Amino acid sequence: MSTLSVPPVLTSPRDDAVQLYRAFKGLGCDTAAVINILAHRDQTQRALIQQEYRAMYSEDISKRLASELTGKLETAVLLWMHDPAGRDALIVKQGLNPNKLDLEAATEVICSRTPSQIQHFKQVYYSRFGVYLEQDIENYTSGDLKKLLLAYVSIQRYEGLEVDREMAVRDAKHLYKAGEKKLGTDEKTFIHIFGERSRANLAAVASAYHDMYGNSLKKAVKSETSGYFEYGLLTILGCSENPAKYFAKELLTN
């Protein structure tokens, strides 16, 4: 496995801007230099580099990067240049582009974020694109996925670790009755519980479900739902139980 070596002493944002400008000059772009600089800087440092580059060369460095790079490298580097909320807003907006829908990407971002993260990137979304996130979800998604996403971005869920055990048991019973116990699936119940419960409470629901019925809630979701709706539910569930494990698994499978 390759590793990135971190420079012992970081250069100033101005020096980084100069080195990037030089990387763009001549025939072709020195992509190794671009990666070596931007991959070793945090978001604050990259923001300062953008400011210095614009001041020195009267040019938006993101536009220059877009013109110099291609493919997945271009996508990755341009996403590096945004803060987390801006990056989320951009990914979701691109995913809800009617000319090239990527509902998996939009669903993953929305369903893997905490309520406070969602509120933050919703504000950025509106300020940057002039449209409310809910409007784009309404216009470019459909069916149960639309209902789930609208619930998930609209409800301010509790973010603490306290759990209502009695409610978790009730929720587990309701999900069993809405899925494995009946012919067909009551999607409304899944949307209601997955859309309104805190991460801690939903993890408790999954634990109670397994204890009572000997089957995992994850397997129940897979057997009772499908498509992007299933993907959204599994993302919410995975992030409620162990966000780090969920993202590590996604990195390995993509």
Image (tube, helix red, strand yellow):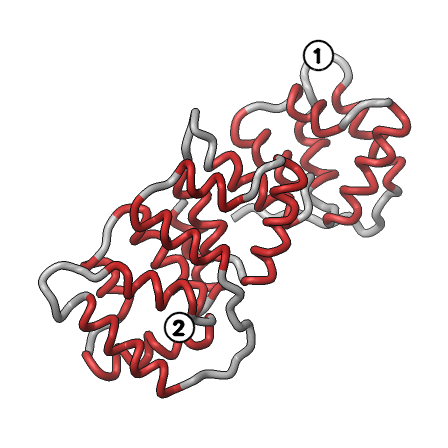
Q: Quadrant of residue 68?
A: top right
Amino acid type of the residue that numbered disc 1 sits on in the rendered structure? Leu
Q: CA gap, disc 1 to disc 2?
A: 55 Å
Above/below status of 65 relative to 213: above
What x and y, as percent, mark residue 213?
A: 19, 79
Answer with mark 1 or mark 2, whichever residue precedes in sequence: 1
Position of 45 relative to 128 (above/below)? below
- Position of residue 16 relative to residue 30, above or below, is below
For the point 76% across and 42% down, the residue is 46
Q: Residue at x 56, y 46 (%)?
A: 2
* Residue 99 relative to residue 87: left or right: left
* The disc label shown at residue 27, or none: 1
Mark 2 highlights which residue? 202
Q: Is residue 179 left or right of residue 18?
A: left
Q: Is residue 152 left or right of residue 25?
A: left
58 lies above or below 223: above
Q: Nearer the viewer, mark 1 or mark 2?
A: 2
SS at circle 2 = helix
